[in-house]
Amino acid sequence: MEYIQIDFQNITSEQTDLLIAELTMIGFEGFEEGENSLKAFIPLSDFIEAHLKEVTDKNKCSFTLSVIKETNWNAVWESNFQPVIVDDFAGIRADFHEPMKEVEHEIIITPKMSFGTGHHATTFLMLQQMRKIDFKDKTVFDFGTGTGVLAIMAEKLGAAGITAVDNDKWSIENATENIERNKCNSIRVIKADTALLNEQFDIILANINKNVILDNLSILKEQLKPNGVLLLSGLLSNDQNDIIESATNLSFQLIDKQEKNNWISLRLIH
């Protein structure tokens, strides 16, 4: 498969975060972050130049474009992926990294996709918040599970049952493999296009993006038990007001907010 590669130079870290978030929403699948630079990748068949121009004009940045032939994307991914370490609490690494002896919980993933997503900050924030939540014997819904990392952590923290949902076939396959690799046995994985499961959960995790969260927020509320916890990320700092307004209208109460590199996580109850 041929890919389009977009190169950005002389950009700030804030521009990088905004570009990653907005390019992801128009179909870009992978990113390589450098010092004051960013490479973004999208399949040629999915590329719409007008959508790219809208993003770059909004963020006031220039770019160069090139077409790249099929290559060893796994080697590219391995050369760029870095472990995620959350204080002394949790670490996420690939199987080609050295074991992490300094953390309480270690998760090993074997990604099927070619690139890192650039969203390490949101994973960090979700894990940081999960440390503060009592998962013991609780039921958990991981909406937009991706690699399955959060579902795996929920089991490690004592959850009685976890339902992990994603709408992407790759994510379902990858999450299933990672769940098996980490020897988890309390997680079921479901392919679905919405959050609607007609079940009740003690804790709901959603590390996706603003639009998907807003589209599904009322459904998530209906599936959350009284006094249940809703933990959100995949959000930029300037998404906060819209999310809080919608959540407040649904009788959610903000309990905690964490921020890292212009990304935020929000912990709410109702």
Image (cartoon, rainbow, N blue to C red):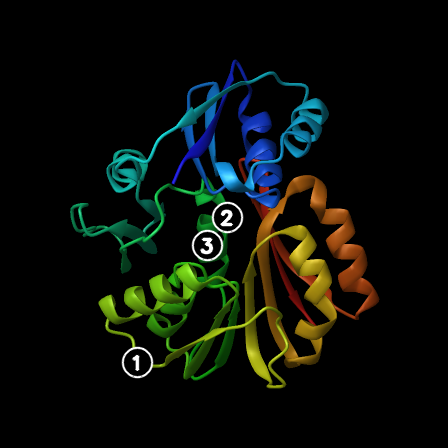
Gap between marks 2 and 1 measured at Cα:
25 Å
Q: Which residue appears at 65% of the width and 58% of the height?
A: 212
Place of residue 3 in the rendered image (x, y in percent of width and height, measured from the top left): 43, 34
Q: Is residue 142 above or below residue 207?
A: below
Q: What is the secondary structure assignment of the residue under circle 1?
A: loop
* Residue tagged 1: 185
Place of residue 237 in the rendered image (x, y in percent of width and height, measured from the top left): 66, 41
Gap between marks 3 and 2 measured at Cα:
10 Å
Q: If the image is split into quadrants, where does the N terminus sit? A: top left
In primary-sequence order, the first of circles 2 and 1 is 2
Q: Are marks 3 and 1 in contact (CB under 8 Å)?
A: no
Q: Which residue appears at 55% of the width and 42% of the height?
A: 46
The residue closer to the viewer here, 79 or 256, is 79
What mark, if any, has residue 39 been given in the picture?
Answer: none
Circle 1 residues within 10 Å: few <14, some 14–19, many ≥20: few
Q: Is residue 146 above or below residue 21?
A: below
Q: Are marks 3 and 2 in contact (CB under 8 Å)?
A: no
- Type of amino acid under label 1: Asn
- Type of amino acid under label 2: Thr
Q: What is the secondary structure assignment of the residue under circle 3?
A: helix
- Which is more foreground, mark 3 or mark 1? 1
Q: Which residue appears at 56% of the width and 18% of the height?
A: 63
Quarter occupied by residue 116:
top left
* Residue tagged 2: 122
* Residue tagged 3: 128
Q: Which residue appears at 41% of the width and 35% of the height?
A: 2
Place of residue 47 in the rendered image (x, y in percent of width and height, measured from the top left): 56, 36
Q: Is residue 55 above or below residue 132?
A: above
Place of residue 95 in the rendered image (x, y in percent of width and height, measured from the top left): 19, 52
The residue closer to the viewer here, 141 or 7, is 7
Left or right of 250 on screen, residue 71: left
